[in-house]
Image (tube, coloured by chain):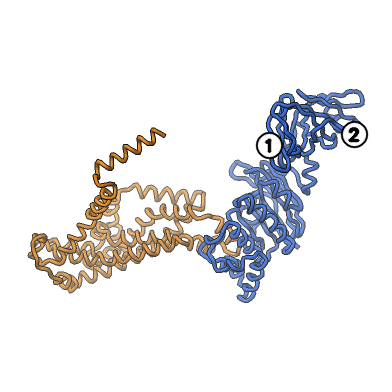
Chain colours: A orange, B blue
Amino acid sequence: MRDVAVVQARSVGFFAALAPRGKAVFFALAAVAICLLFAFPVFWLILTSLRPGTGVYYVHRGTEFTVDNFHEVLSQDIVLRALLNSFMISTLATVLSLGVTATSGYMLSRFKGPIPNAWFSLMYIFRCVPYVAWVLPLYFVTQQLSIFDTYWGLLLPHIAVHICFFSWIMKGFFDGIDPSMEYAAMIDGCSRWGAFWRVALPSAIPGLTALAILCWLYTWNEFLFALILTAHETPILTVVMAQFVHELGMEWHLMSATAVIALVPALIVTLFGQRYVIRGLRI
Amino acid sequence: MAEIVLSNVHKVYGHVVAVKDINLAINDREFVVLVGPSGCGKSTTLRMIAGLEEISAGTIAIGGRVVNHLQPKDRDVAMVFQNYALYRHMSVRDNLAFGLRNRRVPAHEIAAAISRAARILSIEPLLDRRPHQLSGGQQQRVALGRCIVRNPKVFLFDEPLSNLDAQLRAQMRLELKELRLRVPTTSIFVTHDQTEAMTLGDRIVVMKDGVVQQVGTPLELYRKPVNRFVASFIGSPSMNFLAVNVTADGEDFTLACQGWQFTLPSRRFPDLASRIGRSVWVGVRPQHIRLGAPVSGNQVALKGTVMVTEQLGDEQLLAVRLGDSEIRIAGVDPDLALATGSQIEAAVAADNLHFFDEAEEAR
């Protein structure tokens, strides 16, 4: 008992020394610091996007604000096309890769034997390859298949990456679902596929939703594949954003405005998805 | 008619034999309990009957039709699982309707079947709830309801009461017995609890290491266990066993171990003649031992030292040292004060002694 008391006294002393007015103040300061760390760059980005081109280098001093940057980027055809392409690629990649990931994760979770083992090993090997090492071979592959700078040229590599990374997570979700439910469904008149489709998959909705959000945001934010595997025909938002840095200078104000526009869908997806995940967890 | 016949059913996982050559015939509307310790193959046997496990060898027939290669959905069986296995994303009503909808039963028939099952199980107020909003007992009732609505040929129960607390388990046991009267269907019930087996089963199948040890009515198993395993598994507290040497003594047999010796007349125990000069296990149920000296020549005397007493309110259990062995005595007067270390005398009717060969254990 005395030892416990000593430990408690020490920890109280530790917090008292760090935060003289008590623990609450210390934690409040820490929370504010963490929020600032993450929120400040976003705040600065929004501030920059609202400054005229000449004012971006003294954002902290100027008082002149404008929404012309948004007008300017939204009047550019390439930005609008990039917005649409990014949205379509992210959504299609999410839908298609989740379709494969769900079945792949289910197989890894429920079946034993040479086929699941081979599939597991294959994904493990692909996961060991550094992400950046895939880009150049993929460039040649997409050229060979004549899908360079098309939706498929970008979708297929994204789906492949998602399958390798998310099948493991999906396996974890299915491991957490009692297989008895599927056995019950099979006795109740379902085939194995029916038990997966009608019982296992609906039970995994919280997990699937979380993965869908991750998948969508990952593809939306992805830069490297988009840079190497697309050109003028299929502009992608992250690449278009980077093109505001060119030989004539850096158009920070336009880049920031585009970035703020890019933030909005991601923010909506996150907010909508969070609510859905919590609702799903209550099932 | 839905009798179940298992013929030479065998199940192997790699090099491990899970179920070895089971032969069992279950009559129509009979309630059979498979009982045994963990890993004895009872659940595997049930899952093979359900179609959830493939059979390595042998045949299983339900209602005269061999079902070896039929999918679970085509065997017309219903199953209650240990953890209930309710579809957690569906309401209770949808859980009950699921099997019928799969079989394309008309909606009005589904509604009628659900309301009948809900009435039988008193779950009418729960129909619109989700499984996570129900208590363990209520979930168990819904799982039973899911079986009843289907009106299958066979009910299969895989340790359905083991997740419930002791009080609820006793209540559900009674409800299951009542349910049997209202919905008489061929049933197989798997449990590791001998009390459930004794109270529920028309017949009990005792299994160990994938092998059927004995099949019989609860009383047959209790009174005439074929080997030491069955004798120790059935009955609570467990049967006492003492290793004794058998010698011939004129017209009688003398059985002796350290701290205990008694004689039995050979004309009443002719089986012992083949065991002369060998060591056998004598089994005595704790309930069959009475405190006090023998009152007739048919009783065998025991003398020992009280080690521990356990007060249960309506009786006491004694642990008594007998030579270098320890035995349990049940049914002792709860008001009798017995100090640890006190010497006691007890008696058991010779007819209540069971004899098992040591070799039988290997069976």
Q: Is residue B200 above or below residue A263?
A: above
Residue B47 appears anywhere in the view: no
Question: What residue is disc 2 on?
Answer: B268
Subunit that carries the residue with mark 1: B
From the image, tell me which residue sits under label 1.
B310
Relative image position of residue A158 (x, y in whole percent) = 33, 59
Q: Nearer the viewer, residue A224 or B165?
A: B165
Mark 2–mark 1 distance (CA, rounded to whole Å): 36 Å
Q: Residues within 10 Å of mark 2 (few under 14, many from 20)?
A: few
Q: Nearer the viewer, mark 2 or mark 1?
A: 1
x, y (%) of residue A200?
Answer: 50, 60
Query: Image quadrant for the N terminus of chain A?
Result: top left
Residue A94 relative to residue B218: left or right: left
Crowd rating for badge 1 (residues with CA inside 10 Å; few <14, some 14–19, many 20+): few
Q: Horizontally, is B109 left or right of A203 in the view? A: right
Q: Residue at x 51, y 53 (%)?
A: A110
Task: Name the element at disc 1.
Answer: strand
Q: Quadrant of residue B262?
A: top right
User: How many discs appear?
Assistant: 2
Q: Are marks 2 and 1 on the same chain?
A: yes
The residue depicted at 60 percent of the width and 66 percent of the height is: B96
